[in-house]
Image (cartoon, rainbow, N blue to C red):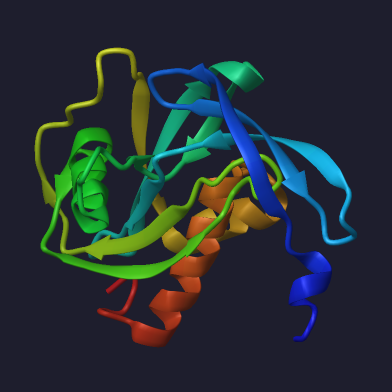
């Protein structure tokens, strides 16, 4: 496409207006493609990793967690923010152990996505893991989750019916399902 100069905005200045433990909010002025200037409010995020853990019988380890902004309990895959200077694959394995209570040496990178392109620079990296071994669950002090084993195909059906409606989890399950069908480390349910 040759539309680069018709679309790209250039940052003129930036001011951090809030610095939290996780999120940093910025107020920028940007020069638009037509030469005018506009403001942009956006959130800087350290990035995150999400893992779809697959047991030998084809079950997934899914989590249920209350999310304060929505005042609702959601189905989710294990996921968490990337710690400073932590490699992405190590974040994925750490979150797998902390939240799901399983560990593995067998995992693959499925891809990444941007969950909030209009207001954040967050990127979420997706992994699928198999040959899982039980380990002690070590959730954060302020984190409360329940674990549930659900067949992979049923979880995908729950996406299509809307029962699973966390955007991160929807994308991760669908991308992992397609990856699994193409790469099939082992046949599900065998």
Image quarter of residue 8: bottom right
In this rendering, does residue 154 appear at all?
no
Q: Is residue 50 left or right of residue 135?
A: right
In the rendered structure, the answer to whether residue 40 lies left or right of residue 72 reads right
Q: Nearer the viewer, residue 167 or 5?
A: 5
Number of residue marks: 0
In terms of depth relative to the viewer, which is nearer, 122 or 146?
122
65 or 27: nearer the viewer = 27
Where residue 21 sits: x, y (%)? 38, 19
Q: Is residue 53 above or below residue 77?
A: below
Vertical placement of residue 105 versus 75, above or below? below
Q: Position of residue 48 (x, y in %)?
A: 39, 45
At a point 13% along the width and 57% down the height, the residue shown is 104
Image quarter hosting the N terminus: bottom right
Image-based side of 53 in relation to 75, left or right: left
Q: Residue at image x 39%, y 76%?
A: 180
User: Going 71% across and 46% down the picture, which residue do you hit?
Assistant: 118
Please state which of residues 81 and 72 is positioned toward the viewer in this rendering. Answer: 81
Q: Position of residue 190 (x, y in %)?
A: 27, 74
Which residue is found at the position 33% from the left and 13% from the top? 142
Whole-percent x and y of residue 53? Answer: 30, 55
Residue 128 in view: yes
């Amino acid at each position: 496409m040759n539309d680069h100069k018709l679309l790209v905005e250039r940052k003129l200045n930036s001011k951090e207006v809030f610095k939290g433990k996780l999120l940093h909010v910025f107020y920028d002025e940007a020069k638009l493609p037509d030469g005018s200037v506009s403001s942009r409010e956006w959130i800087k995020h350290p990035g995150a990793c999400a893992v779809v853990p697959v047991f030998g019988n084809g079950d997934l380890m899914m989590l249920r967690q209350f999310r304060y902004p929505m005042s609702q309990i959601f189905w989710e895959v294990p996921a968490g923010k990337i710690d400073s200077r932590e490699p992405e694959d190590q974040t994925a394995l750490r979150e797998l152990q902390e939240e799901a209570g399983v560990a593995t040496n067998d995992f693959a990178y499925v891809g990444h996505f941007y969950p909030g392109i209009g207001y954040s620079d967050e990127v979420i990296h997706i992994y699928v893991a198999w040959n899982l071994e039980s380990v002690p669950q070590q959730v954060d002090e302020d984190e409360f989750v329940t674990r549930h084993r659900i067949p992979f195909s049923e979880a995908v059906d729950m996406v299509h019916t809307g029962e699973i409606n966390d955007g991160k989890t929807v994308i991760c399950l669908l991308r992992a399902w397609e990856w699994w069908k193409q790469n099939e480390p082992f046949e599900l349910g065998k």
